[in-house]
Amino acid sequence: MHIAFIGLGIMGRPMAMNLQRAGHRVHVHGRRPESMTPLVQAGCTACDSAQVAAAQAEIIFTMVSDTPDVEQVLFGANGVVHGAKPGSVVVDMSTISPSATRRFAEDLGARGIAMLDAPVSGGDVGAINGTLSIMVGGKPEIFEKVQPLFAVLGKNIVHVGDHGAGQVAKACNQIVVALTIEAVAEALTFARQNDVDPAKVRAALLGGFAASRILEVHGQRMLDDNYQPGFKTRLHQKDLNIVLQSAFELGLALPGTALAMQHLNALLGADEGELDSAAIMKVVQRMSGL
Ligand code: NAP
Protein backbone atom coordinates (compact mmCIF):
# COMPACT_ATOMS: atom_id res chain seq x y z
CA MET A 1 0.00 0.00 0.00
CA HIS A 2 1.18 3.57 -0.68
CA ILE A 3 1.41 5.52 2.57
CA ALA A 4 2.39 9.12 3.34
CA PHE A 5 4.07 9.87 6.66
CA ILE A 6 4.45 13.52 7.72
CA GLY A 7 6.35 14.51 10.88
CA LEU A 8 9.57 12.60 11.55
CA GLY A 9 10.48 13.41 15.16
CA ILE A 10 11.12 11.09 18.10
CA MET A 11 7.88 9.21 17.41
CA GLY A 12 7.23 9.66 13.68
CA ARG A 13 10.62 8.45 12.45
CA PRO A 14 10.47 4.92 13.96
CA MET A 15 6.77 4.60 13.12
CA ALA A 16 7.42 5.39 9.44
CA MET A 17 10.34 2.96 9.53
CA ASN A 18 8.13 0.15 10.87
CA LEU A 19 5.59 0.73 8.08
CA GLN A 20 8.40 0.57 5.51
CA ARG A 21 9.76 -2.65 7.05
CA ALA A 22 6.25 -4.16 6.89
CA GLY A 23 6.50 -3.91 3.10
CA HIS A 24 4.58 -0.71 2.36
CA ARG A 25 5.66 2.07 0.01
CA VAL A 26 6.20 4.99 2.40
CA HIS A 27 6.43 8.60 1.13
CA VAL A 28 7.89 10.71 3.92
CA HIS A 29 7.97 14.44 4.54
CA GLY A 30 9.95 16.10 7.33
CA ARG A 31 10.24 19.85 7.83
CA ARG A 32 14.01 19.46 8.18
CA PRO A 33 15.28 17.57 5.11
CA GLU A 34 17.94 15.77 7.19
CA SER A 35 15.16 14.12 9.25
CA MET A 36 14.28 12.13 6.10
CA THR A 37 17.82 10.77 5.49
CA PRO A 38 17.65 7.53 7.57
CA LEU A 39 14.25 6.73 6.12
CA VAL A 40 15.39 7.27 2.54
CA GLN A 41 18.36 4.97 3.27
CA ALA A 42 15.80 2.36 4.37
CA GLY A 43 13.87 2.69 1.09
CA CYS A 44 11.27 5.42 1.75
CA THR A 45 10.68 8.20 -0.79
CA ALA A 46 11.52 11.76 0.33
CA CYS A 47 8.89 14.41 -0.52
CA ASP A 48 9.40 18.19 -0.56
CA SER A 49 6.02 18.90 1.03
CA ALA A 50 3.02 17.33 2.75
CA GLN A 51 1.11 18.00 -0.47
CA VAL A 52 3.52 15.91 -2.56
CA ALA A 53 3.54 13.05 -0.01
CA ALA A 54 -0.27 13.03 0.22
CA ALA A 55 -0.65 12.94 -3.57
CA GLN A 56 1.14 9.54 -3.66
CA ALA A 57 -0.85 7.84 -0.92
CA GLU A 58 -4.09 6.12 0.04
CA ILE A 59 -3.45 6.57 3.77
CA ILE A 60 -1.77 9.75 5.08
CA PHE A 61 -0.28 9.71 8.58
CA THR A 62 0.57 12.90 10.48
CA MET A 63 2.73 12.90 13.63
CA VAL A 64 3.60 16.51 14.44
CA SER A 65 3.63 18.51 17.66
CA ASP A 66 0.49 20.51 18.42
CA THR A 67 -2.94 21.53 17.13
CA PRO A 68 -1.72 24.50 14.99
CA ASP A 69 0.94 22.22 13.47
CA VAL A 70 -1.64 19.65 12.37
CA GLU A 71 -3.78 22.47 10.96
CA GLN A 72 -0.82 23.82 9.01
CA VAL A 73 0.23 20.40 7.70
CA LEU A 74 -3.32 19.57 6.60
CA PHE A 75 -4.68 22.90 5.34
CA GLY A 76 -1.71 25.30 4.99
CA ALA A 77 0.34 26.16 1.92
CA ASN A 78 1.59 22.92 0.31
CA GLY A 79 -0.56 21.05 2.82
CA VAL A 80 -2.21 17.64 2.59
CA VAL A 81 -5.55 18.86 1.20
CA HIS A 82 -3.81 20.27 -1.89
CA GLY A 83 -2.51 16.80 -2.83
CA ALA A 84 -4.78 14.17 -1.26
CA LYS A 85 -7.15 12.29 -3.55
CA PRO A 86 -10.85 11.95 -2.66
CA GLY A 87 -11.31 8.61 -0.93
CA SER A 88 -7.97 8.83 0.86
CA VAL A 89 -7.74 8.73 4.67
CA VAL A 90 -5.86 11.10 7.00
CA VAL A 91 -4.74 9.42 10.24
CA ASP A 92 -3.56 12.02 12.72
CA MET A 93 -1.50 10.35 15.44
CA SER A 94 -0.34 13.60 17.09
CA THR A 95 -1.82 14.54 20.47
CA ILE A 96 -4.03 17.57 19.86
CA SER A 97 -7.32 19.21 20.85
CA PRO A 98 -10.44 16.98 20.54
CA SER A 99 -12.62 19.91 19.42
CA ALA A 100 -10.14 21.00 16.72
CA THR A 101 -9.96 17.35 15.62
CA ARG A 102 -13.74 17.28 15.06
CA ARG A 103 -13.45 20.47 12.99
CA PHE A 104 -10.58 19.05 10.90
CA ALA A 105 -12.58 15.84 10.28
CA GLU A 106 -15.53 17.89 9.06
CA ASP A 107 -13.39 20.08 6.76
CA LEU A 108 -11.64 17.03 5.30
CA GLY A 109 -14.96 15.20 4.91
CA ALA A 110 -16.29 18.11 2.84
CA ARG A 111 -13.42 17.40 0.41
CA GLY A 112 -14.13 13.66 0.28
CA ILE A 113 -11.20 12.79 2.57
CA ALA A 114 -11.87 10.61 5.64
CA MET A 115 -10.11 11.15 8.97
CA LEU A 116 -9.23 9.19 12.07
CA ASP A 117 -7.70 10.65 15.21
CA ALA A 118 -5.30 8.02 16.55
CA PRO A 119 -3.07 9.41 19.30
CA VAL A 120 -0.71 6.99 21.00
CA SER A 121 0.82 6.09 24.32
CA GLY A 122 3.98 4.08 24.90
CA GLY A 123 6.72 6.59 24.19
CA ASP A 124 9.71 6.31 21.90
CA VAL A 125 10.30 2.71 23.04
CA GLY A 126 6.78 1.73 21.98
CA ALA A 127 7.24 3.53 18.65
CA ILE A 128 10.52 1.72 17.94
CA ASN A 129 9.20 -1.71 18.99
CA GLY A 130 5.78 -1.33 17.33
CA THR A 131 4.03 -1.81 20.68
CA LEU A 132 2.16 1.50 21.04
CA SER A 133 -1.28 1.81 22.56
CA ILE A 134 -3.45 3.47 19.91
CA MET A 135 -6.71 5.27 20.81
CA VAL A 136 -8.85 5.80 17.75
CA GLY A 137 -11.74 8.14 16.97
CA GLY A 138 -13.72 8.13 13.72
CA LYS A 139 -16.09 6.04 11.63
CA PRO A 140 -15.97 2.24 12.23
CA GLU A 141 -15.57 1.37 8.53
CA ILE A 142 -12.54 3.69 8.24
CA PHE A 143 -11.07 2.19 11.40
CA GLU A 144 -11.42 -1.29 9.86
CA LYS A 145 -9.65 -0.10 6.71
CA VAL A 146 -6.63 1.26 8.64
CA GLN A 147 -6.53 -1.50 11.29
CA PRO A 148 -3.81 -3.59 9.50
CA LEU A 149 -1.50 -0.55 9.57
CA PHE A 150 -2.29 0.12 13.23
CA ALA A 151 -1.33 -3.52 13.91
CA VAL A 152 2.16 -2.74 12.54
CA LEU A 153 2.54 0.27 14.86
CA GLY A 154 0.94 -0.93 18.06
CA LYS A 155 -0.42 -3.70 20.22
CA ASN A 156 -3.36 -2.34 22.23
CA ILE A 157 -5.58 -0.75 19.59
CA VAL A 158 -8.99 0.50 20.73
CA HIS A 159 -11.65 2.16 18.61
CA VAL A 160 -12.98 4.49 21.31
CA GLY A 161 -15.77 6.28 19.43
CA ASP A 162 -16.51 8.94 16.82
CA HIS A 163 -14.21 11.82 15.76
CA GLY A 164 -12.30 13.29 18.73
CA ALA A 165 -12.89 10.27 21.01
CA GLY A 166 -9.31 9.07 20.52
CA GLN A 167 -8.01 12.50 21.58
CA VAL A 168 -10.29 12.49 24.64
CA ALA A 169 -8.88 9.08 25.64
CA LYS A 170 -5.34 10.39 25.16
CA ALA A 171 -6.13 13.43 27.33
CA CYS A 172 -7.30 11.02 30.05
CA ASN A 173 -4.02 9.12 29.67
CA GLN A 174 -2.04 12.32 30.17
CA ILE A 175 -3.95 13.20 33.34
CA VAL A 176 -3.11 9.80 34.86
CA VAL A 177 0.53 9.97 33.76
CA ALA A 178 1.09 13.52 35.11
CA LEU A 179 -0.52 12.85 38.48
CA THR A 180 1.35 9.55 38.85
CA ILE A 181 4.67 11.30 38.12
CA GLU A 182 3.76 13.78 40.86
CA ALA A 183 3.00 10.92 43.28
CA VAL A 184 6.22 9.04 42.49
CA ALA A 185 8.32 12.22 42.82
CA GLU A 186 6.79 13.04 46.21
CA ALA A 187 7.13 9.46 47.50
CA LEU A 188 10.79 9.09 46.50
CA THR A 189 11.61 12.52 47.97
CA PHE A 190 9.80 11.57 51.19
CA ALA A 191 11.88 8.37 51.41
CA ARG A 192 15.18 10.19 50.83
CA GLN A 193 14.44 12.89 53.43
CA ASN A 194 13.66 10.11 55.92
CA ASP A 195 17.15 8.69 55.27
CA VAL A 196 15.64 5.64 53.58
CA ASP A 197 17.10 4.49 50.26
CA PRO A 198 14.58 5.60 47.59
CA ALA A 199 15.84 2.85 45.24
CA LYS A 200 14.84 0.23 47.82
CA VAL A 201 11.48 1.95 48.32
CA ARG A 202 10.88 1.86 44.56
CA ALA A 203 11.79 -1.86 44.50
CA ALA A 204 9.46 -2.60 47.41
CA LEU A 205 6.54 -0.66 45.92
CA LEU A 206 6.89 -2.31 42.52
CA GLY A 207 5.55 -5.57 43.97
CA GLY A 208 2.45 -4.04 45.54
CA PHE A 209 -0.62 -1.94 44.97
CA ALA A 210 1.38 1.21 44.13
CA ALA A 211 3.13 -0.49 41.20
CA SER A 212 2.90 1.26 37.84
CA ARG A 213 4.88 1.77 34.65
CA ILE A 214 5.52 5.33 35.86
CA LEU A 215 7.04 4.09 39.13
CA GLU A 216 9.14 1.64 37.14
CA VAL A 217 10.37 3.85 34.27
CA HIS A 218 10.09 7.43 35.55
CA GLY A 219 10.99 6.36 39.08
CA GLN A 220 14.27 4.99 37.73
CA ARG A 221 14.89 8.22 35.79
CA MET A 222 14.40 10.18 39.03
CA LEU A 223 16.80 7.91 40.94
CA ASP A 224 19.39 8.33 38.16
CA ASP A 225 18.73 12.08 37.92
CA ASN A 226 18.53 11.41 34.16
CA TYR A 227 15.89 13.45 32.36
CA GLN A 228 16.83 12.78 28.74
CA PRO A 229 13.53 12.51 26.80
CA GLY A 230 11.49 10.26 26.39
CA PHE A 231 8.53 12.53 26.49
CA LYS A 232 9.43 16.20 26.59
CA THR A 233 8.10 18.49 29.33
CA ARG A 234 6.92 21.03 26.75
CA LEU A 235 4.76 18.35 25.09
CA HIS A 236 3.29 17.24 28.41
CA GLN A 237 2.51 20.90 29.20
CA LYS A 238 0.82 21.16 25.79
CA ASP A 239 -1.30 18.10 26.60
CA LEU A 240 -2.43 19.32 30.02
CA ASN A 241 -3.27 22.66 28.42
CA ILE A 242 -5.62 20.72 26.09
CA VAL A 243 -7.18 19.01 29.14
CA LEU A 244 -7.59 22.21 31.17
CA GLN A 245 -8.95 24.20 28.22
CA SER A 246 -11.59 21.52 27.68
CA ALA A 247 -12.34 21.39 31.43
CA PHE A 248 -12.78 25.19 31.39
CA GLU A 249 -15.29 24.90 28.54
CA LEU A 250 -17.17 22.14 30.41
CA GLY A 251 -17.11 23.93 33.80
CA LEU A 252 -15.21 20.96 35.20
CA ALA A 253 -12.86 21.10 38.23
CA LEU A 254 -9.64 19.10 37.79
CA PRO A 255 -7.51 20.36 40.71
CA GLY A 256 -4.84 17.65 40.51
CA THR A 257 -4.27 18.29 36.82
CA ALA A 258 -4.10 22.04 37.46
CA LEU A 259 -1.38 21.46 40.08
CA ALA A 260 0.66 19.25 37.74
CA MET A 261 0.32 21.96 35.07
CA GLN A 262 1.89 24.53 37.42
CA HIS A 263 4.87 22.24 37.95
CA LEU A 264 5.30 21.78 34.21
CA ASN A 265 5.03 25.58 33.81
CA ALA A 266 7.83 25.95 36.38
CA LEU A 267 10.07 23.67 34.31
CA LEU A 268 9.36 25.66 31.16
CA GLY A 269 10.16 28.87 33.08
CA ALA A 270 13.50 27.34 34.09
CA ASP A 271 14.28 26.61 30.43
CA GLU A 272 13.86 22.88 31.06
CA GLY A 273 11.10 22.20 28.53
CA GLU A 274 13.26 19.78 26.54
CA LEU A 275 13.75 17.49 29.56
CA ASP A 276 11.61 14.40 30.09
CA SER A 277 8.53 15.26 32.14
CA ALA A 278 9.81 13.02 34.95
CA ALA A 279 11.72 16.26 35.72
CA ILE A 280 8.66 17.25 37.79
CA MET A 281 10.91 15.69 40.45
CA LYS A 282 13.19 18.73 40.15
CA VAL A 283 10.29 21.08 40.98
CA VAL A 284 9.25 18.96 43.97
CA GLN A 285 12.84 19.04 45.27
CA ARG A 286 13.31 22.78 44.72
CA MET A 287 10.13 23.58 46.68
CA SER A 288 11.78 22.12 49.78
CA GLY A 289 15.20 23.61 49.06
CA LEU A 290 16.68 20.25 48.05
P1 NAP B 1 9.13 15.77 18.25
O1 NAP B 1 10.29 14.86 18.39
O2 NAP B 1 9.25 17.19 18.69
O3 NAP B 1 8.70 15.70 16.70
C1 NAP B 1 7.67 16.48 16.15
C2 NAP B 1 7.92 16.52 14.66
O4 NAP B 1 6.88 17.28 14.04
C3 NAP B 1 9.25 17.20 14.31
O5 NAP B 1 9.91 16.41 13.36
C4 NAP B 1 8.81 18.54 13.74
O6 NAP B 1 9.65 19.03 12.72
C5 NAP B 1 7.48 18.21 13.14
N1 NAP B 1 6.62 19.40 13.08
C6 NAP B 1 6.15 20.12 14.12
N2 NAP B 1 5.41 21.14 13.70
C7 NAP B 1 5.41 21.06 12.32
C8 NAP B 1 4.82 21.84 11.31
N3 NAP B 1 4.06 22.90 11.61
N4 NAP B 1 5.06 21.47 10.03
C9 NAP B 1 5.81 20.40 9.74
N5 NAP B 1 6.39 19.61 10.67
C10 NAP B 1 6.19 19.95 11.94
O7 NAP B 1 7.83 15.19 19.01
P2 NAP B 1 7.41 13.68 19.22
O8 NAP B 1 7.88 13.25 20.56
O9 NAP B 1 7.73 12.88 18.02
O10 NAP B 1 5.82 13.87 19.36
C11 NAP B 1 4.96 13.96 18.24
C12 NAP B 1 3.52 13.89 18.77
O11 NAP B 1 3.34 12.65 19.46
C13 NAP B 1 3.17 15.01 19.75
O12 NAP B 1 1.83 15.41 19.58
C14 NAP B 1 3.34 14.32 21.10
O13 NAP B 1 2.55 14.92 22.10
C15 NAP B 1 2.90 12.91 20.78
N6 NAP B 1 3.45 11.84 21.64
C16 NAP B 1 4.77 11.80 21.96
C17 NAP B 1 5.24 10.77 22.78
C18 NAP B 1 6.69 10.68 23.20
O14 NAP B 1 7.00 9.90 24.10
N7 NAP B 1 7.62 11.41 22.57
C19 NAP B 1 4.37 9.79 23.24
C20 NAP B 1 3.05 9.83 22.86
C21 NAP B 1 2.60 10.86 22.06
P3 NAP B 1 11.12 19.64 13.12
O15 NAP B 1 11.99 18.43 13.25
O16 NAP B 1 11.45 20.49 11.96
O17 NAP B 1 10.93 20.40 14.39
Image (spheres, grey):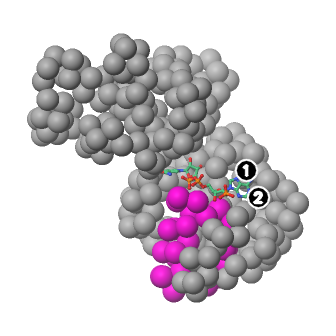
Q: Residue furthest top?
A: 288
* Ligand 1 quadrant in view: bottom right
Residue 109 on image: x %, y %: 78, 59
- Which amino acid type corresponds to the residue marked 2 in the rendered image? Val
Residue in the picture at 64% in, 21% down: 248
Do the numbered discs 1 and 2 sit on residues whose CB atoms are within 8 Å? yes
* In the image, residue 14 lies in the stretch drawn in magenta: yes
The residue lying toward the viewer, choosing from 75 and 40, is 40
Magenta stretch in the rendered image: 1-30
**Quadrant containing the N terminus in the rendered view:** bottom right
- Which amino acid type corresponds to the residue marked 1 in the rendered image? Asp
Mark 2 residue element: helix
**Quadrant containing the C terminus in the rendered view:** top left
Q: Which residue is mark 2?
A: 73
Q: Which residue is mark 1?
A: 69
Gap in Å between the C-alphas at discs 1 and 2? 6 Å
Residue 235 on image: x %, y %: 57, 42
**Does the Cβ of the disc 1 residue fall within 8 Å of ligand 1?**
yes
